[in-house]
Amino acid sequence: MKYINKLLLGAVSVLFMASCVDDSLLDYRVDKPESVVQQEYLNEYDVLKSYVDRSASPDFKLGAGVSLNAFNERGLVYSHIMSNFDEVTAGYAMKHGAIVKNTGSMDFSGVEKFIATTQEAGITIYGHTLAWHANQNAEYLNSIIADREIEIDPNDANNALHAVTSEAKANIWDWQLEYTLPTPLTQGVEYTLKLRAKASSPFTVAFWRTDGSSTNYGPDIAFGESWGDASVTFTPTMDATRLQFCFGTFAGDLYFDDMVLTASGSEENLIENGAFDDEDLSGWGKPGWHSYTFGVEPVAAGPATWWTNLVTNSDVEGDDVSSFFATEITVGPDPATIGAAGTGADGVGRAIVVKSGDNPTNSWDTQFFVKAPQQLLAGQAYRFSMKVKADKPATISSQSHNNPGGYVHWSMIGSPAVTTEWQEYTSSGVISGDQAGSNGMNTIAFNLAEFKEANTYYFDDIVWEIEESGNTIPLTPEEKADTLSWALDNWIAGMLEVTNGYVKAWDVVNEPMDDGNPYELKTGVGKTDLAADEFYWQDYLGKDYAVMAFNLAAQYGSPEDKLFINDYNLEYNIDKCKGLIKYVEYIEEQGARVDGIGTQMHINTTSDKDKIVEMFNLLAATGKLIKISELDMGIADGVLTTNATEEELQAQAEMYKFVVEKYLELIPASQQYGITAWSPLDSPDNSSWRAGEPIGLWNESYYRKPAYAGFADGLSGE
């Protein structure tokens, strides 16, 4: 743009007249700096919120992300925001990590001042956020679900049956402990033997029943170095009169306590003095030629013991198949197939379904794997149980592997005989050196091709437990869920008590969907780089954590509050947008209320416009309130403010205009909650968010950018 510099012309004219020079004077023209031209053009715009068409969308909120502390100072930030926006969202200071202390107490003083400041400014607050995995006080949350300490009195002792063997012999039956039953066991009746036991070194004791002339074998009983529970269920094939515990290959100390033998449907203990409270050993004995000693004696209490289940989704009611793998899956994708409803044990729930091929060469041509999340070494006591059936009767053998397909040993938990009816198979023991190998084992492999024809197998209620001990004991999943349910309730109740009456809209759940599996929830399971403030409520409360959060927000808030779910990359990954919508449907199916969906839109000048349109159409079709919750925009390839060209800044203005226009065009007016500019100013070099990028509508000196004009034109439709 060119113009006559009138000030300069006037000065020159005065000089001309004073000197009486007879030369003619031409107009002197100069180029006005483009930056000045640009700023004059932008200065012609009014404040940003004036471009909202209040007649079309009277409830539309033009929002801005702010630093709570900077806004509370009532300085430049306050004036700037108050002039241009209707609503503010605190970037951090209303989140769990900012409010909840390591003791669990909550400090709302900053929030209370924030409310007072916004009231003075005549603008509203959008609450952000109640349930998220980031910006949490993870130290506190982890502390309340940490292992529970157990107070153990070293002087506390109880009686136990103690057997001491001097040497390990060649055969398991070379040391025997017998109990003659007061009443013989009845053939065909199911019995359960429960006891507590330990050994001076891990060992598996052979458990037999006998009528004096023939023997029933197994299942055996695993002894660890700490007290642990064992359970054996069996059905005698004869009217057995004695129980035998054989440990001929063991040298050391064995302890038995709290023995209870019951018949199915009865609670009567068939073992007299099974708790060994006194020294009466009626019925107990050993073969006369055995030289080991046994008797009742006090045993000091040791570390606590417990059993930990290594299998995720044991009951196959969830969709997680991380513990299950198979070869030759013919129904559904790898790594394992979950059957339809009704395929589970006794027709209830679902099962893992594996089909074996026809005419196999080897028994292992089809294998089903159950994988633990950790390496197990020799000496580790374990218990395994599962329910299983097949379309055709078959016997399946088991192996130990180091990862699925990493064969270690030919035998692990026996060879279940599978029928066409559901039955439970159990095994317990101690992992041997052969089974563990040199590097440990973590997988039980079942060979499903023993039967030489194609067959279909069904597995359900798979439990693989290991015995652990110590002076602390982990909370059960149920205990952790109960504790965290209380913590979530306490947090939401506290925040809404302080803000109720002024904050009328909330991000109740933030960023729930997984980027790689956009129809599934995010998880921290398996992550080795968790941030100090990262905590995944959903890993402990399950899929219904959002149901709980929305119900709590409705319970403690006001009926007119607008409750949102919010996520990012919905315009980049359309499946994630669809996954979020599906999750909203699920939340509402469980009885909770979701009023709106927020799309963050941290985008670039080269973001796919077609996908932006598709996202808006999908969100509009939900009938929910739709909010652009955190809009900011970088220049392609992460161009920094110092390198941004005029052409790139104009492209940014055009994209801002496009996004705002399409929101107003594709989202019905009745569903338009509004748009929040997440970073009104360009990001400083030292920022934790898109550092040094020209993402704002103003630069860092509060001068309007072309992006401001694009945003305003989008709002006004001009």
Image (cartoon, rainbow, N blue to C red):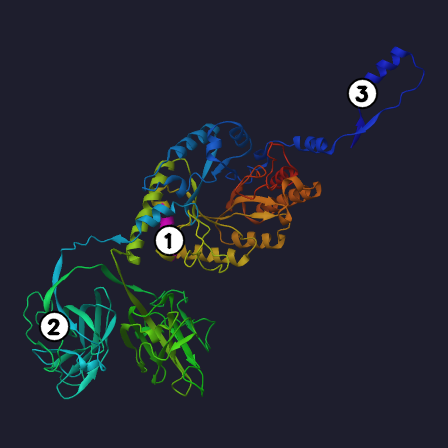
Rendering coords of residue 296 (x, y %): 9, 68
Q: Nearer the viewer, residue 610 or 219?
A: 219
- Identity, as a three-letter code, of the amino acid under mark 1: Tyr
For label 2, the residue is 294
Instruction: Give the quadrant of the C terminus.
Output: top right
Q: Is residue 54 left or right of residue 5?
A: left
Rendering coords of residue 306 (x, y %): 25, 62
Query: Is residue 193 on the magenta stretch?
Result: no
- The residue drawn where x is 38% and y is 85% is 450
Residue 196 in which image quadrant = bottom left
Q: Earlier in the sequence, mark 1 or mark 2?
A: 2
Q: Which mark is residue 423?
A: none
Rendering coords of residue 129 (x, y %): 43, 44
For label 3, the residue is 8
Measure the C-alpha gap from mark 1 to mark 3.
72 Å
Q: Residues within 10 Å of mark 2 (few under 14, many from 20)?
A: some
Residue 231 vs 208, above or below: the answer is: above
Measure the C-alpha gap from mark 3 to mark 2.
117 Å
The magenta segment: 543-552
Residue 180 in which image quadrant = bottom left
Q: Is residue 718 left or right of residue 31?
A: left
Query: Is residue 544 on the magenta stretch?
Result: yes
> Please, which residue is most extreme toward the right here?
22
- The residue drawn where x is 12% and y is 61% is 158
Measure the C-alpha gap from mark 1 to mark 2.
54 Å
Q: Are marks 1 and 3 in contact (CB under 8 Å)?
A: no
Q: Which mark is residue 545?
A: 1
